[in-house]
Every structure is written in C-alpha cells, then in structure tokens.
Amino acid sequence: MTELDIRAKLGSLVEPELGLAYDRLGLINTIQITADTIKIDVQLPTPAYPGRERIGDAICTALYALSTDRKVEVTYSWKVLGKETGGKIGLRIKNVIAVGSGKGGVGKSTTAASLAYGLKHFGAKVGLLDADVYGPSIPHLTGSKGTPIVKEFELENGQKIQRLEPIESDGMKILSIGFLIRENQAVIWRGPMLHKLLTQFLQETDWGDLDYLIIDLPPGTGDVSLTLSQLLGLAGAVVVCTPQKVALLDAIKAISMFDQVKIPVLGIVENMTGDIFGRGGAKAKAAELGLPFLGEIPIEATIRVRGDDGKIASLVEEDNPARPYLLRMTENVAMQIVKRVVLDAPLPTLEIL
C-alpha cells in the first residue's frame, strides 16, 4: 500500500461537521508508512474542532477495510484557516469576528468575552477589542487593568512608526476605551470621533499575529459597524439575543444592518435561555431566516458571578454548569468560519454612494 493509495482512499471520506470531503478541507497532512505502522497526521482547520475522534475512527475504518495488516495511528495538529481579514489595513490577523446585538442587556459583551476565551482555551491566538465606546464592560468582565502605552517601532526602511500596545490579561491582548477614561466617566462623542478611535484601535495598534480578533460592538445599529465594514473585510458577525419576542425583533434589525454593510452573519446565539425568558425563540428565528444557530447559553448564576468578579475567563477553564454551552458555541462559530473559507464565500466590499 502506497501513500497515493492511502490519500485516494481517505480523500473522498466526508467530514461530519461540514459535510465536505477530506480533500476539500485538506485534513490529511502527512502520512508515514513503516513495516508495521501507518501514521496519519490530521491537520484540523481550527483548534476548536468538535469531536475530532470521529475523523480518526473513520480513517481507521477505511484503512482496515483495505485489509492492511499494519497498525493505524492517527495524530492531530491544526492550522487556522482564515480570510486574512486584517490584511486590508496591515494587520496580521486571520479572522476578525464582530459580536453584536439589536439591543442592550442581552449579554453581548459576556458572550464576546466568552467566545474570545473559548477560542484561547482551544489553543488559538486571540485578541479582544471592546468597541462599545459608550458602555465599555470588557475591562470589568475580564478583570484587566492598566493604561495602554504607545511604543515606537522602526521599519526595515528606517521609518519610525508608533503603535498602541494592548493590555494583556490571562494571556490575551485586550483593548478598550475603558482603559483610557475614569471608571465613572461618560463618553459623549459624535460619529467622527468614534470612527477615529476605532481606526486607531485597529490600524494603529500592535495586535501582533492573531488567529482571531473578537470585536464587542455597541448595542443597536449604530455607525461603528459601518466603520468596521469600511476598514476590514470581516470573517463575519455573531448576533446575540435572548429568547423572548421583543429581543428577537431587535436581533432581526441587527441582522439587517449587517446585511446592509456587507458583513456576513455567521449565526445567532441565544443567551439567558431558561424559565424566565423562555427557550428556543432564537433557534426558531435562525431556522426561519436560514441562518446557523450557534448555540444556547443558559441563564446560569455562575456566569453572572464570574462576570461581576472579573473572572469571565474561568468560565471555560473550570468545571461549572455554563462551560459546555460556552465551548460548544465557540466550536460552532469557529466551524462557520471554516465553512466560509473552504467554500470561498465572497467577502464583498462596501460601496459608499
């Protein structure tokens, strides 16, 4: 049995999450054949790949069906696929993901922070940008403090440039206007000021090499999303809402906004699922709109307590009732991006008339 035989046999297998052939996803990385062993390295398109063991089981079944007398060993590595969405303004970021909502109070910032730390938990390099200028809550949720400093860098051509250095908390780069103002200070700005700040937070910040940058948007349908669509080709947006109808009505407006500014919607997250707000409203609405449902997050006291204590990162690292829901939501978001990359879904640019 040769390597070509093995690749031909495995390439046509269908990956269970996306329904695409192994060849299409580039899953089979390296193959080593010895007298008694076949070693297959599977290169996953994201570290947040769910149920990777199913791929290993399918590989073993397929090769043993060839009547091989060699032992099959499957190992896993990963390389994040991305649209290199930060490249438009010189960022070395594979995927920029916006997290938005149609209204406030639905847990958008908590979801954004949980998504960022969920991706980091799986092994990705992640940054978190708080673009909610009027109500920045990321510093409190993450328990991060400090004042970003400006560093000077010298390019190869001798030109010197200045870049803002994000705050690092729990191994993640974080930036928010909350680091630059007093805790009780109100921000009273018009659109041009918001545009200037967001441009600085993206284009003039040293984010380094990232697999994912999560951006926590302001609630509603303001002009921050318009600025993002002009600056970047985003990998997509996650819409957060609660199950009740009034929240779903506003979520639909947020989805409409993303459509208008040419930001693809990755799907909907239902937050605060439970007896108080009900269950399943967002899932039903996602099906009605033909959008992916990215998961539900229960109305669980642990989430509120950890957020209040500035320990939102612990939700995905420690055993608690919310952990499996948050990690499954993270996996779903990551896989939606993979699907868009592999299928080469276009990322249209916004035309200003």
Image (tube, rainbow, N blue to C red):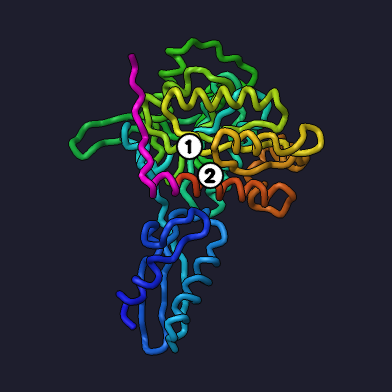
Q: Which residue is mark 2?
A: 333
Q: Earlier in the sequence, mark 2 or mark 1?
A: 1
Secondary structure of the residue carrying numbered label 1: strand
Q: Nearer the viewer, mark 2 or mark 1?
A: 2
Viewport quadrant of the N terminus? bottom left
The image quadrant where one finds the C terminus is top left
On screen, residue 327 versus residue 275, left or right, reads left
| Residue located 75% across and 43% down the image | 302
- Residue 228, given in percent of the width and then of the height, sits at 42, 26
Crowd tier of the residue under label 1, counting other residues whose Cα lies within 10 Å: few below 14, some 14–19, many 20 or above = many
The answer to which image quadrant residue 135 occupies is: top right
Vertical placement of residue 220 versus 302, above or below: above
Numbered disc 2: secondary structure: helix
| Residue 221 x, y percent position in the rendering | 54, 19
**Marks 2 and 1 close (CB-CB < 8 Å):** yes
Residue 257 position (above or below residue 303): above
Instruction: Tell me which segment is drawn in magenta.
Output: 338-353
Instruction: Reply above or below: 346 against 10.
Output: above
Q: Residue at x 50, y 49 (%)?
A: 335
Q: For marks 2 and 1, give the CA distance.
A: 9 Å
Q: For this rendering, which residue is in front, 58 or 70? A: 58
Q: Where is mark 1, residue-wise?
A: 97
Q: Residues within 10 Å of mark 2 (few under 14, many from 20)?
A: many
**Residue ID at (26%, 36%):** 154
Q: Residue furthest left?
A: 157
> Is residue 88 on the magenta stretch?
no
Amino acid type, callout 2: Val
Left or right, 197 with reference to 110: left
State yes or no: residue 352 in magenta: yes
Residue 101: image location, x then y, percent: 59, 27
